[in-house]
Amino acid sequence: MDFTLTFDAAYAAHAAVVMATVADVMPDDELRYWVVTADDVNQRARAVLDRAAGPNATISYLDVDATRLSKSIGCDPVMMQYLSPAMYLRLLVPEALPSQVERVLYMDCDVLCTDTLKPLFEMDMGGVPIGAVRDAFNRRLLDMGGLPGMMSYGMDPRASYFNSGVLLIDVPAWKAAGVTERSISYLDRHAQESRYPDQDALNFAVYGNWLRLSRRWNDVMSWRLEPEFGGRLSDAAIIHCNGPLKPWQPNFDKGARRDLYWKHRRLTGGLLRTRR
């Protein structure tokens, strides 16, 4: 099974935690990571990542031309406090993968895995380039200010809008649809006016051509899974701590998600620089 993460040094420790949670729930599976990092991720960080990925995992680092993605990180001052230009690197992964990789799962560095991810690799995607979960807060293209430019492109403002924190990618279909180029072209026109630039670009690039997944695979309202609210973290296979508050921050609510993050952070020995 093939996975990808993209990050800079500020998120390297958190990427290690993501890998550690995958290894924990899939201890007997062969895992292959295809990673794209910013130049500031050093050999010490890579050693921590190797340890976190587990004994049945390999990590390969892809070379990409990041200069293609020198874009604004958006217009929202709250979002800009924790977004990084490295968010755009995911757009370059599929074209950099070796030809034998036909399906890859992208995950943000603020997710935690609580159950096996095998069903995603066995799912029939029907030939579309992306499988994703509808965003719980921005459910339609028109929500929260709307997708910049949508009306000029003839897009239905009521169409579903997905969260890009977890992406099931059919690599040949991605390439055939020109998702990378379409996304970059969109960013050239709209990145500076977008709240979620990479996410908006992908929603534009695969408009009408993506598979809607169950929220089990990217639960962005994971606070509901805390035991104090009557839930269980395992009710979702991937919990996504999106937004400005993260489990590694002191003001993140105490509870099962925070405990799960720090359990794996301690196990990885992640003495890496982190982003606030």
Image (cartoon, rainbow, N blue to C red):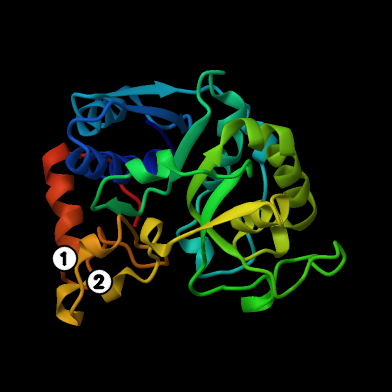
Quadrant location, the N terminus: top left
Q: Amino acid at mark 1?
A: Ala
Which secondary structure lies at badge 2?
A: helix
Say whether residue 203 is left or right of residue 260: right
Q: Amino acid at mark 2?
A: Leu
Whole-number angstrom distance, CA of label 1 to CA of label 2? 9 Å
Q: Quadrant of residue 77?
A: bottom right
Number of the front mark, 1 or 2 = 2
- Which residue matches tag 1? 256
Q: Residues within 10 Å of mark 2 (few under 14, many from 20)?
A: some
At 74% across and 73% down in the image, what residue appears?
157
**Image coords of residue 252 (percent x, y):** 25, 69
Which secondary structure lies at badge 1?
A: helix
- Which residue matches tag 2? 225
At 46% across and 42% down in the image, what residue appears?
106
**Image coords of residue 210 (percent x, y):** 62, 52
Circles 1, 2 touching at the beta carbon (< 8 Å):
yes
At 19% across and 62% down in the image, what residue appears?
258
Task: Mark 1 or mark 2: name the one nearer the start of the chain.
Answer: 2
**Image coords of residue 118 (percent x, y):** 33, 41
**Image coords of residue 202 (percent x, y):** 65, 51
Quadrant location, the C terminus: bottom left
